[in-house]
Image (cartoon, rainbow, N blue to C red):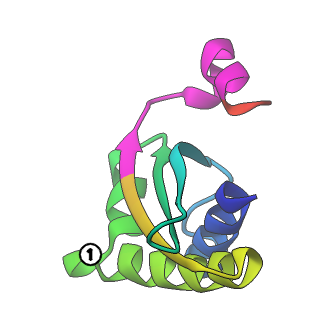
Amino acid sequence: LASEIIREKILHKTREEIPYAVAVVLEEFKEEPDKNFTVIRATILVERDSQKRIIIGQGGRMLKEIGQKARIEIEKMLSRKVYLELWVKVKENWRQDERVLKELGY
């Protein structure tokens, strides 16, 4: 669910600039019970470098805003604080790669 929330925020913020050529892979989802927070590390996959630049935005502003909005919604869902770390990675033609699609659960 966390990956879908992140993806939703990307699509909402970028609207038509980023078509549906974006996927979110959860690299880590670890609850820290003694510290009362959850660590989430995710990679945002895009097909082209131009899409990566759009998602990161000038000075990282777009990625920061996407991360903040996603973190707030995930915190509400989990009822606890969340440390959310996002990375953007270009993987050309990932939508045509059956191995990648299987890894993503498609």
Residue 94 in the magenta stretch? The answer is yes
Q: Which residue occupies 44% across, 71% down?
A: 35
| Label 1: which secondary element | helix
- In which quadrant is the N terminus drawn? bottom right
Measured from the top left, where is residue 83 in percent x and y? 43, 70
**Left or right of residue 100, residue 61 in this image:** left
From this viewpoint, which residue is outermost toward the top?
99
Does residue 96 lie above or below 5 as drawn?
above
In this rendering, the answer to whether 71 lies above or below 27 is below
Return the residue nearer the eye: 50 or 102: 102
Q: Residues within 10 Å of mark 1 (few under 14, many from 20)?
A: few
The reply, left or right, for residue 43 in relation to residue 73 is: left
Indicate the position of residue 3 as horizontal and vertical percent values: 65, 56
Q: Quadrant of residue 94?
A: top right
Q: Is residue 64 placed above or below 52 in the rendered structure?
A: below
Amino acid of disc 1:
Gly
Residue 82 drawn at (x, y percent): 51, 74
Q: Which residue is mark 1?
A: 60
Q: Residue at x 53, y 28 (%)?
A: 93
- Up-down: is 73 above or below 2? below
Specify start and end residues of the magenta stretch as a single range: 88-103
User: Measuring 56% from the left and 62% from the top, which residue is drawn there?
Assistant: 18
In the image as oriented, which residue stretches furthest toward the left?
A: 59
From the top left corner, tell me how far across and down residue 47 is, in percent.
48, 40
- Where on the picture, by quarter, is residue 102? top right
| Res. 7 image quadrant | bottom right
User: In which quadrant will I find the C terminus?
Assistant: top right
